[in-house]
Image: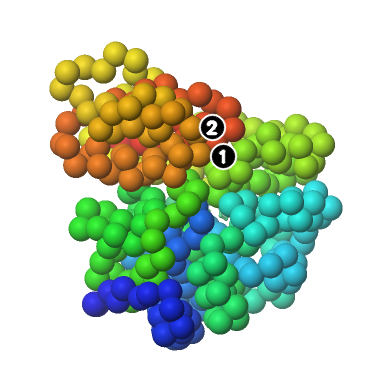
Amino acid sequence: MNTLRLNPDDTGMQSAADLLSAGECVAIPTETVYGLAADARQGQAVARIYAAKGRPSFNPLIVHVPDADAAAAIADLAPQARALADAFWPGPLTMVLPLRADAGIASLVTAGLDTIGLRVPAHPAARDLLRRFGGPLAAPSANASGRISPTSADHVLSPDGGLDGRIAAVLDAGPCAVGVESTIMGWPEGTATLLRPGGIAAEDIETVLGAPVARHQGDPSRPSAPGQLSSHYAPNAALRLDVTDPLPHETHIAFGQPGPFTLSASGDLSEAAARLFDMLRRADLAGRPISVAPIPEGGLGAAINDRLRRAAAPRD
Ligand code: TXA
Ligand code: MG
């Protein structure tokens, strides 16, 4: 398959919408990372996502919709979910919600669960595409399974862990602004629970809810949000974390200091998040073990550290 690179102009957007209607997979920009989109109502189209990514089949996919009304046609939004939708949609928040029986979503999307992860993306190209396409789009991150999430069309097409030749097209709208995936919230025991730290800080969610949210506990290799495998974000090189004294043979990723591989010279966490995956790739290309400076845990630091711990986890 020859993967097309489409521009986000009228012609390119319409081509992307037409390919999706025809059951093809198209990589699309969102404000977090590039997603590999397919029509969430067509089981065969969704199967192409798993095939292109080589993804373990037990991983349910996030479904992207244009607004909260479209979400409410697919899942039940209890008052707390409504409040979070009002506060953070469109934006980098995914909510795992009870799936409506009449939603018309292919069961492969939810991997057979009776819940569904829904999100309203903020990226203008993603919003334009959802309008033109006129339906829900299932889209996990557009990388081969177990590889680093892509924050540019070049990453999507990269010869190392990319999808060139495996998908119909990529809609190229430049680099992603947020750079880490959406925050995932769910209500597994009836209480608001952070299932994955991401682009919206848990503290900001607690402010809206007026109550603390439970942090998902447990063995990261036995995920309750299925698919949160500990080795999900893996460069080729070995990775050491919280390193203040890098070894001479290591490529060191700095934070709060200048350098050839700094996440943010000024110590800005949102700048660090936006650069994270690109920096891991670039450091990986140097072909040496990687060490990473300590990243403070507050705000977006939680998501960055979560991704780094996964990248550093022992590989299968
Ligand atoms: O920012 C993002 O969220 C990006 C962009 C493309 O929207 N998408 C993304 O999707 O990160 P993915 O597939 O790489 O991660 C989806 C996560 C997985 O950990 C999956 O298990 C969880 O969401 N998830 C999806 N549906 C779920 C459900 N019904 N119950 C529990 N977890 C679910
Ligand atoms: Mg992913």
Task: Please indicate whether residue 262 sits to the left or right of residue 11 in the image.
Answer: left
The local secondary structure at tag 2 comes to helix
Q: Disc 1 marks which residue?
A: 197
**The C terminus is located in which quarter?**
top left
- Asked where in the image residue 262 lies, by quadrant, the reply is top left
Give the residue at x 31% y 73%.
5
Task: Name the N-terminal-most of marks 1 and 2.
Answer: 1
Vertical placement of 293 versus 261: above or below?
above
Give the residue at x 32% y 40%.
279
Q: Disc 2 marks which residue?
A: 302
**The N terminus is located in which quarter?**
bottom left
Task: Please indicate whether residue 311 sits to the left or right of residue 137 in the image.
Answer: left
Circles 1 and 2 in contact, beta carbons < 8 Å: yes
Crowding at dot 2, Cα within 10 Å, few <14 / some 14-19 / many 20+, comes out as: many
The local secondary structure at tag 1 comes to loop
Residue type of the residue flagged with mark 2: Ala
Q: Position of residue 133 (x, y in %)?
A: 55, 81
Give the residue at x 40% y 33%.
264
Task: Please indicate whether residue 69 sits to the left or right of residue 281 in the image.
Answer: right
Vertical placement of 281 versus 91: above or below?
above
The answer to whether residue 132 is seen in the rendering is yes
Q: Position of residue 104 (x, y in %)?
A: 64, 76
Task: Please indicate whether residue 73 sits to the left or right of residue 40 in the image.
Answer: right
